[in-house]
Image (tube, rainbow, N blue to C red):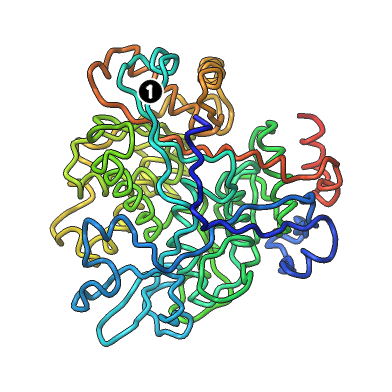
Amino acid sequence: MSAASFQAPLGLLSRRRVLGVGAAMAGAYGTSSVASLWPEQAGVHAENFFGAALLPQFRGDARVVPALAERFPWVQHGENTRHPLQIANAFDASLALDARATEGWLGERQFLVGRGKAVLPWAPMFERPSSVVAANRDLRALAGTEHLFIKDEGSDHIAIYGNKVRKYEFLMPNLYYGGVRRVYSHGAYGSNHCAHLALTARFAQFHAAPGPDGMDVVLNLYPQAITENVRVKLRLLAATGVDLRFLEGDAAVGLSIKLHSQLNKTTQRSTEGFIDPGGSSPLSVLGHVEAAMELARQIESRSCALDGPPDFVFLPIGTGGTAMGLAVGFYLLGWPTRIVATCSQDKSVLARLVVNGDVTEPFDIAHARHLLAQAMPWIRKLGLVGGNVTPEDILKDRFSYDNDTWRPAYGKMSASVAEGARLARQAGLVLDGTFSAKSFNTLTRYGENRLLAGRRVLFWNTYQRFPFETLLTENDAWAKDLPADIQSRLAQA
């Protein structure tokens, strides 16, 4: 898998040097000094512990057109001046988006560029497309199907890449052009979202302004089982210089999310904004509608191993942005593809009720359905569906889920999942214990039950396997400012 995942960047890569410990990086990317919500939980203003390494970067190109616009040309800015809402490349400096009038809540904002005309900024931040490869014989044997393909959303070479970044391509320019220069979010200690948000917000290019004008990031972290992957993610967060806060208990986490989400309930420009845990928002769902169109382009151009629409797509589900965006995309394409989503966790009845207002469905599933309902206005405004199309129309016969394999805990694998991940790695497929390994286990159980015979099966591998530890220095100084109980947990793990 690894050799096929990296495609030459065709001259669009530049390399921004990541400086070693010292004042140079700290001066360029200062950390936040906002007080913690709870005084006893002092914010950790981490210093930077990147070694002398190079962080590969995708150079923003104003000429890139989304795959969505190739199939629905009216959504591309400039193609049809009569359409009221279009997608504009955020790297097009001529749009002067930072000076435009806006409508909507922060982070869900359209920018008015003409009389009765509005655009959504989109910043392509990694080289397209991510590869689709045919699984080798060993992986097909594990999966129990002869027709297994993999959409590889990870890279061995590019740090800012893949599944999470697709969401930020709509989110980050929307926040930036709304005035935001400090963004708050939440996640578990080893959150993929938090790690990729820290890298993207502080080091990626997502606007047309000259220079490395990134954002400060404040991350509110909550506990999960300490694994080596979690340890690396915490080291990475410390190295980026983000402001770390640590929360305990569902009530504290829920209250913190609720309070921070109020930042976005303004129609004015604001220097501070909020991104939901996981990076999913109504607007960011468009990132995976775009991903579905990318997949269709690969299939139709015969530039990948998959020779037709898949019958099944297996993927993990957390906050639901990937699954719901792909479901919309497959609906628009008219594909009969069924998404099988493996939940990453579940919550108590009380948490289900408070967060999702639903106690009957698993936490992740109810959250995803709610997210799709919130995204529908964007889908309609872009002219992709009529006003009578509902979320139920999109998901009917296209979506099912597995709410068993996530056990024993979020981020922790059962013995069977761990063994499957080990065998998959031997066969060349690298998976993570929080999401993709559990999804692959669901796939293999479908295969064992002969539910995939004769079907085209696509495994959407969300894991960004870039070796982040290679960017980090080999010392323990990164942990010295963490709260004592966090240091104790790390030491005991």
- In the rendered image, which residue does mark 1 sit on? 443
Residue 151 versus residue 216: which sits nearer the camera? 151
Q: Residues within 10 Å of mark 1 (few under 14, many from 20)?
A: many
- Disc 1 is placed on an element classified as helix
The residue shown at (31%, 77%) is 118
Where residue 343 appears, x then y in whole percent? 43, 34
The image quadrant where one finds the C terminus is top right
Q: Is residue 74 visible?
A: yes
Picture layout, residue 378 above or below residue 396: below
Picture layout, residue 292 above or below residue 116: above
Where residue 257 appears, x then y in whole percent? 55, 57
Where residue 376 appears, x then y in whole percent? 27, 58
Q: Tell me where residue 32 sits by quadrant.
A: bottom right
Q: Tell me where residue 249 sits by quadrant.
A: top right
The residue shown at (37%, 58%) is 282
Q: Is residue 345 visible?
A: no
Residue 349 versus residue 492: which sits nearer the camera? 492
Amino acid type, callout 1: Leu
Picture layout, residue 121 above or below residue 311: below
Determine whether, in the image, residue 325 is placed left or right of residue 471: left
Picture layout, residue 198 above or below residue 491: below
Determine whether, in the image, residue 315 is placed left or right of residue 385: right
